Amino acid sequence: MNVEHINPFLSATVTVFRTMLKCELVRGQPFLKNGTQPPFDISGIIGLSGAAKGTVVLSLCRESALRAAEAMLGQAPSSIDADVRDAVGELTNMIAGSAKAKLEHLNLSVSLPSVITGKGHCIDFPRSITPVCIPFDCPWGMVAVEVGLGPA
Amino acid sequence: MNVEHINPFLSATVTVFRTMLKCELVRGQPFLKNGTQPPFDISGIIGLSGAAKGTVVLSLCRESALRAAEAMLGQAPSSIDADVRDAVGELTNMIAGSAKAKLEHLNLSVSLPSVITGKGHCIDFPRSITPVCIPFDCPWGMVAVEVGLGPA
């Protein structure tokens, strides 16, 4: 995957968390995902297509998801309910939309976000694609964005 | 969701299973998915965008996934491994591609398939979309396709 395609997703994530959630993310070291997966509790996923095809996944630990939903909705959910799932889907959508705007030459369009829950769920990309995982730390816990882009 | 948009996914699923896996699916009654989710073991997911935006999910029970992979690969996997995940992703890709060709007026493009594993995983669509679930039965066990399409 072209490293120049990573930065738009990285900066989109930081900006969306800052503006929508008033949450400052601290970026960890991006790495090529090789099968191992940190145990997140909830993930938003959205497809990209255009001059490249791909997928963006935003994964959050339980606490990060609950606090992010609280920041968006103004009240604290007590469990990962429909409000939290919608908040995570909307954040995923905003990150993909913001990155797409910065990758104008790829003429990307985004699909609908879906949200995956289930303790220990795994999301795998096609073997032909090695996604890049960008881990973030924030006061609420762990957040990660995975991006896989391949030829159209 | 427009009911005319369902049939292309239904017939694409039957055709892909018949031609790729030599497996005859028996269609159950499609229903609007309202939050409850049958407990599948593996799901392929792919995004659609164009004059509409959406997501297609192909879910299989463990036995169906193993046997589908065996039919594609020519040898029986013993667990849901990388080969099985790739087979499910490829089937999802073929179903979306075949349905897209039948929905020419929507000018859809498909993203990359991702594959979700984890016992009891749930996949939720945005609240603004009510996906249609098409259950199928086959000699191997349960298979279902969910489609959610909304305005672009």
Image (cartoon, coloured by chain):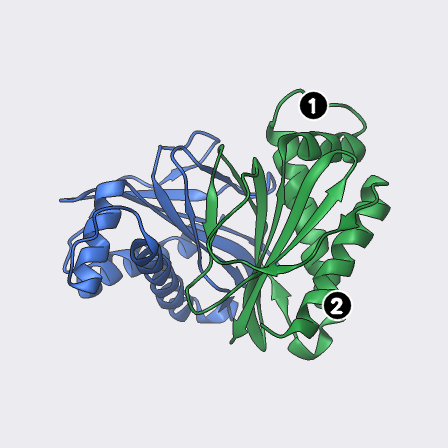
Chain colours: A green, B blue
- Mark 1 burial class by Cα count in 10 Å: few <14, some 14-19, many 20+: some
Q: Mark 2 highlights which residue?
A: A101
Classify mark 1: helix, strand or loop. loop
Residue for point 42% across, 43% down: B132
Q: Give the quadrant of residue A63.
A: top right
Kindly check if marks 2 and 1 are in contact, taking CB atoms under 8 A apart as contact.
no
- Mark 2 burial class by Cα count in 10 Å: few <14, some 14-19, many 20+: some
Task: Answer with left or right where residue B2 lies relative to residue B15.
Answer: right
Looking at the image, residue B111 lies above or below residue A73: below
List x then y, in percent, for residue A40: 57, 39
Query: Is there any visible trace of residue B51 in the rendered image?
Result: no
Residue for point 68% across, 66% down: A6
Three-letter residue code for mark 1: Pro
Classify mark 2: helix, strand or loop. helix
List x then y, in percent, for residue B90: 35, 63
Task: Answer with left or right where residue A111 lies relative to residue A91.
Answer: left
Of the pair A115 and B133, the residue shown nearer to us = A115
The chain to which mark 2 is attached is A
List x then y, in percent, for residue A96: 67, 58
Q: CA distance from mark 2 to mark 1?
A: 32 Å
The chain to which mark 1 is attached is A
Of the pair B102 and A81, the residue shown nearer to us = A81
Q: Mark 1 highlights which residue?
A: A77
Spot the residue most to the top: A78
Residue for point 67% across, 34% down: A65
* Of pointers 2 and 1, the one earlier in the residue sequence: 1
Three-letter residue code for mark 2: Ala
List x then y, in percent, for residue A17: 79, 46
